[in-house]
Image (tube, rainbow, N blue to C red):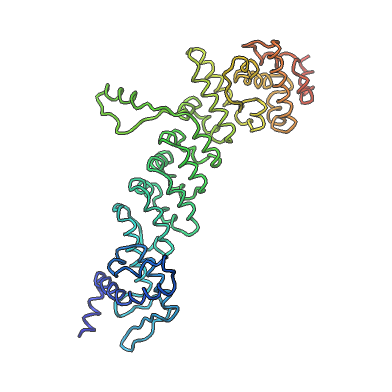
Amino acid sequence: MARILRVLALRIRGQRQVRVKQTVSRIYPTLQSVEVAAVPMEEQVLAERTFEEAFDDDRCIERGILMFRAGVEAGAIEIRTGPRRNLVRPDQPKRVVGACGMSVSSAERYFLFRAARLIFRNHPTVRFSSKGMLTDISVLPRLRLLGLMRPAALIALQQGLNTRFRELFYPENEIRLQAIGQLQEFHITAINEALGARSSDLAGWSPEMILAIAESFTCAEQLKDIGPELLILKGPTVVRALGNWSIRDVTEKVNEERTRRGGQKLSGQAFETDIGIVRNLLAGDFTILMEQPAELLEAVRLLVVDLRKIEKKTERADRVEEFRLFCKRYLGYMTPDILNALHLLDTEVSDTADKALSISFREVLGILEGLWTKEGVGRAFFEQVLTTPHGVKALRNLVDDVLQMKSRGSIKANTDLAAILSGSDLFDSHIKQFIDKKKTSALM
């Protein structure tokens, strides 16, 4: 009768879990002995703990499973079942054991799930599938990485990744998971908002990319203003370059406006970013900008800083139009070598004498416009020559010539360099080998 009643009771899941706990409590002293024999004293976690204490500690459960496997392998533990006490061999993990009505593999999964719930005891709203994620004991250390995250950040992560959340626990994703653990809640929620349905792509980003986001962006607005273009950024160096773009705290201004409209004040801070300003200025061309290398984004950052310093509205409007023209027409040709040749990567200069020897963005645009509109040069020069070593050298020599003329006073402030380059042969010595003679002679 006892055997029959036990069979009936073990059909109930809760009863099976009670029995497996009782069964393991009986072999717990053996697990402790195996640990003492196999693990250095300073690394032992079971030896000084009672079973109930160990049952409430995820690291003890992890160690217990490892010691159980080691004990079975060494012959210190045998699992037998049935009236004849038949041995359950290690290669029979799915064979049901009568003492608890569960197989060895099912019992291990029960304790794995118990350990996972202990790791997430401070994250009661986190949900996951034990079948899909708790596939092996090696998952537990990766779970602990997520368990260190703030609850709100972890919830946002699970919402954004959706079904791809389980991918984080694959063995090959451990380094990626470590990087994701560095993200704060505002990083994750901003990525979710910026990417929408594609926010789950985060599960496949490189660890270096994720770490660059965690270390470079200090407010959600930076990520939101980049928007879906996050998916086309060319690596962590680009992310770090964008992280250097200016942000400004506009909380007070926003709260004043909300109060004026009868709304409530913000619960946190609000920021304005240069990334957002440039997005508004460039509209559709913003995507092209986000595809550029870090060196170009650094040059654009400096341009925007200079734009903000202009006080006169009319002058600022002119500079904005020039900036738009530069981005629309020339952005795709700007390599790091060309940026250096144009001195667009030079740091800001404050000394008046130094400014006389430097080249302004307007002068850079004048040079580019002059080459673009010059007969026999034009678009063909940009597409076929400029990005080659010879083209870069020619451009560098031309710019150096302009700087020398500025230092001598031959070129004054606000000189129309585009008109000089396009309408005269003053600088032709640097590009004469690239001028299409057929086009120029046809006009004569």
Viewer-side residue, 162 vs 363: 363
Q: Is residue 249 above or below residue 402?
A: below
Q: Is residue 431 above or below residue 202?
A: above
Q: Where is residue 256? Give x, y as percent.
A: 30, 22
For the N terminus, which image quadrant?
Answer: bottom left
Residue in view at x 74 percent, y 13 percent: 424
Residue 265: image quadrant is: top left
Q: Residue furthest bottom?
A: 84
Q: Is residue 422 above or below residue 262?
A: above
For the C terminus, which image quadrant?
Answer: top right
Q: Residue furthest front?
A: 41
Residue 68: image quadrant is: bottom left
> For this view, does 176 lie left or right of residue 422?
left
Viewer-side residue, 44 vs 325: 44
Residue 327: image quadrant is: top right
Q: Where is residue 177? Give x, y as percent.
A: 45, 52
